[in-house]
Image: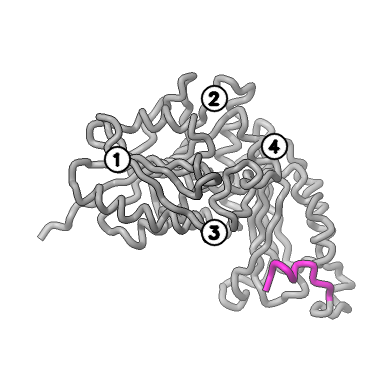
Amino acid sequence: MAAHRKTPLSLLVGLSTTLRGPVLDAVIDATTVAIVVDQDELRSRGVLTWQVVDAGGRLDAGEFTVDDDCGACQLIESLLPLLETLVARGHWQHLVLATPPAMEARPLASALVATMPEIEVDTVTCVVDAVLLVEQLSGDELLDERGLALGPPDRRNVAELTARQIEYADICVLANAHRSQAPERLQNLLLHLNPRTTVVAADPAGVPAAPVARTGWFDFAAAEAWAGDLAESDRLQPSGDGVTTVLWRSTRPLHPARLNDALEDIVNGVVRSRGVVWLANRPTQRVRWESAGYSASLGTLGEWSDTNHLAECTVVATGVGLDPARLQSVLDACLLTESELATLDWQSLEDPFAGVLP
């Protein structure tokens, strides 16, 4: 008996619903149906509005209620039955899901892969604004300050969201490129943040110059690997046009207090950094390092003994106009010195990260 054919689904993410519109119009044809979710009424009414559209226009509309819990989780939970209904109708050969501005593709793709065998995630496309891209990646403004948070618990910043949307995308549509003074630099920046992606320019009307859906390019394992621990030198893109990615590595642990004091200097000039670090006062823990714009965060990734790696520090950092030697010097100054390695009681060191690490 032949296996039932899966329905391909393309995900469309991005901060600007205005720029999303022409891209969405370009991918809807006679075989495609789209669910378009917006968050314009989330802050005022606590709902995400949605509509179902195909080539003939709007077919249905409604809203999802979001309370004070995880807005992204509630959106996924609400979307799955709607997707199941559209697939069961069998009228279309392709689904498009246009997400609200603050949604990342990764949790959606993971949920679809895990729970909907009748759907195959086909393409993840991110629409970026050439005029605002560097600004969005470089600041520390919270989504909540922009009215874009997916509920009260959402404390992400704009830079973090922008970076994560780009890093998971098979295709990045560079909109407003005609208004940018350095579109090649922006394309280079996107490839540094995600070497897996294909950058597609949009014309002045916002229409992409190449197919951006139903490409068959999504590879769940590859997307998850890139979104996970970023620590391999062969993932580095060559520097060029003002964009630089640096790999910093050390087999010595970091002094937690010196690292805390240096956070502002470390993220200066860096739009995105990720990696795994070794804190001297937590000798058995693998600690996730992540920064976006002017914000840095740490989290636990388990024990070093659970991996094939000896304890070490590995950070990959990307910036526009980044000085690699300066960054290397700042990070090196946070390491334990040779004399500290020999004489310090590591466990007794002050722990400035006690509030964020268990």
Tell me where residue 285 appears, x and y as whole percent: 66, 74
Dot 4 amino acid type: Val
> How far separated are the C-alphas under marks 4 and 2?
19 Å
User: Would you say 221 lies left or right of 166 here?
Assistant: left
Dot 2 amino acid type: Asn
Q: Residue at x 31, y 36 (%)?
A: 53
Tell me where residue 206 appears, x and y as whole percent: 46, 24
Q: Residue at x 64, y 58 (%)?
A: 275
Q: Residue at x 73, y 69 (%)?
A: 355
Q: Residues within 10 Å of mark 2 (few under 14, many from 20)?
A: many
> How far separated are the C-alphas under marks 2 and 1?
31 Å
Q: Which of the two discs, 4 and 2, labels the residue nearer the N terminus?
A: 2
Q: Which of the two discs, 2 and 1, labels the residue nearer the N terminus?
A: 1
Q: Which of the two discs, 3 and 4, labels the residue nearer the N terminus?
A: 3
Dot 1 amino acid type: Asp
Would residue 306 be counted in the magenta stretch? Answer: no
Q: Nearer the viewer, mark 2 or mark 1?
A: 1
**Tag 3, which secondary structure?**
loop
- Magenta residues? 349-358
Residue that carries the numbered disc 3 in the rendered image: 68
Dot 3 amino acid type: Asp
Q: Could you say which quadrant of the image residue 293 lies in?
A: top right
The label shown at residue 176 is 2
The label shown at residue 320 is 4
User: Would you say 353 lies left or right of 65 here?
Assistant: right
Q: Residues within 10 Å of mark 4 (few under 14, many from 20)?
A: many
- In this view of the protein, which residue sits in the foreground, 222 or 355? 355
Q: Which residue of the protein is positioned furthest toward the left in this rendering?
A: 1
**Tag 2, which secondary structure?**
loop
- In this view of the protein, which residue sits in the foreground, 24 or 79? 79
